[in-house]
Amino acid sequence: MSGGERIVVTGLGAVTGWGVGVDELWEGLLSPQPAIRPVVRFDTTQHRTRLGSEVPPPEGTPSDPRGRVDGFERHLRLSLSDRFALLATRQAVAQAGFPDTRRAGVFFGSSTGGMLESEDFYARLCGVIPGRAPLSWIPSQQYNGPGDAVARELEATGPVTTLSSACTSGALSIADALDSLRSGEIDLAVAGGSDSLCQLTYAGFNSLRAVDLAPSRPFREDRAGLTLGEGAGAVVLETLSSARKRGATPLAELLAGASTCDAHHMTAPSPQGAGAAAAIRRALSEATLQPEQVDFVSAHGTGTPLNDAAEWQALAAVFGERAADLPVTSVKGSIGHLLGAAGAVEAVVTVRCLLEGVIHPTPGDGDVDPEAPVHLVRRPESPQRLQVGLSLNLAFGGSNAALLFRRWSPP
C-alpha cells in the first residue's frame, strides 16, 4: 500500500550472537571477527558442521550443563524465542520514549517458535534426558508465541499478527505493520521477528547440505553454505503525527515494504532472481524512488551458492550497470542466519547504518565470486551520500521481501 502519512522508526531493539542490545550488535558488526562459535546447546557431533551463532547468556549468568541459555527471565510458559522477542521489544520501546503501547498493533514473525522447548519436552517425556516434562511447556511451541508474549507485555489492544514465511517472516511483519499504519487502523506498531536455534532446524539444514563447515562467506567465490544463528529484532513504527504529538525523535523513515513469490521451487530461488527483482521494483514504486536513489543494500546474503547468485541477478536486473558499484553488505557473515528473525534484525541494522552514516562490513576472506560481482563491503565504508538503504530477504518457498528506509530529514 502506498500513500498516506509518513511512517517513521522511533525505536530499535536486537538480540543476537553479539549479545543483548543494538549497540552490542553494531560494535560486533564493525569488528573483523564473527559471532560464530561451536554450538553448545545441543550435541552436534553427528552433523556436518558444529558451528552456529548462539545468543550468549548475560554476563555473570552461567548456562546449565547442557548449554541451555539461562538468565533470560525463565518462565514456564515462555519459549526462548518469546524471551528474545521481549528483550528486543523492551529496547525498542525504551528508545522510542515509552509511548502508550496499549493502543499499539503487534506484528511479529517466527519460523520455528518454541520448537526448542518442544524438543526438550519430548526428550524428557521419553527419558532421553532427566527431569520432568511440565505440561505448561506445551503452549510455548506455537509460532505465534513471540508476538503474543510481546502483546501481553505491552497490553496492546491493536491487531496482533504472526507471520511465518520462513526467512522473510521478520521483514514481512514490518511491511504488514506499515500497511496497517498507513490505512489508519493504528498509529503505533511494534514489529519484528524472533527465533531460537533448535535441533530440528540444525539437522534440517545439515541434511540439505546447505551449511558451511566454516563461518559463512556471503558472495565469496569459495562460499559453501550458510551458518545458522538465533535472536530477535524489533522496531517501533508510528505515524509522523503520533511521533510529533509526543515529542519523539524519528530515527529513520520506512518508505516501503513489498513482497513477491518466485513460484519456482520449495528451497531453491529462481536462478534469474526474477521474484526478488520484482519485490525491489515494487518497493521502489511504492516509495516513488528511482533505482539510482538507493545508496546501499543489506542483502539476504546467506553464503549459499544458489542464493547469492540469484540475489546478484536480481540486483543486476534492477540497478543495471550500477549494480557492480552499489555497496552490498550482509549480517549473516557475522551473526549467521536468524531465519524468522533475519529480516527484522537486518532492518534494525539498515536503520543503524543510516544513523551512523557507515555501512558495516561482511567479515571473512576470499575473493568475490566473478559470477556475482557485487561491491561487497569488506571494511566499514562511509559514503558521502547515505540516505536510502534497501533491506532484501529471500526465503524457502520462493518468498521475497524488500524494505526501503530513508535517513530521517524533517519536512
Image (cartoon, helix red, strand yellow):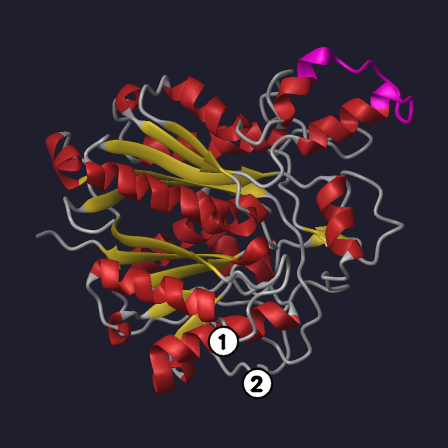
Say which quarter of the image contains residue 190.
top left
Report x, y in % for residue 262. Answer: 50, 62
Q: What residue appears at the point 26 percent right and 32 percent down from the top-left corner?
A: 188
Q: Secondary structure at mark 2?
A: loop
Q: Secondary structure at mark 1?
A: helix
Residues under numbered marks 1 and 2 in contact, where contact means CB atoms less than 8 Å apart:
yes
Q: What residue appears at the point 59 percent right and 82 percent down from the top-left corner?
A: 369
Report x, y in % for residue 277. Answer: 41, 69
Chain-order first, disc 1 or disc 2: 1
Please name whichever residue, 281 or 25, is drawn nearer the observer in this view of the structure: 281
**In this view, which residue lies farthest toward the front?**
263
Q: What residue appears at the point 66 percent right and 44 percent down from the top-left corner?
A: 54
Q: Amino acid at mark 2?
A: Glu
Label 1 neighbourhood size at 10 Å, few (<14), some (14-19), many (20+)? many
* Left or right of 115 on screen, residue 82: left
Q: Inspect the magenta stretch and tell me whether residue 354 lies in it.
A: no
Report x, y in % for residue 40. Answer: 77, 42
* Left or right of 356 on screen, residue 368: right
* Left or right of 405 on screen, residue 213: right
Report x, y in % for residue 100. Answer: 25, 22
Report the magenta residues as a range: 124-137
Q: Inspect the magenta stretch and tell me whether residue 125 lies in it.
A: yes
Q: Which mark is residue 312?
A: 1
- Separation of residues labelled 1 and 2 (CA atoms): 9 Å
- Seen in the picture, residue 127 relative to 217 is either above or below; the reply is above
**In this view, which residue lies farthest toward the right?**
127
Q: Amino acid at mark 1?
A: Trp
Q: What residue appears at the point 56 percent right and 41 percent down from the top-left corner?
A: 231
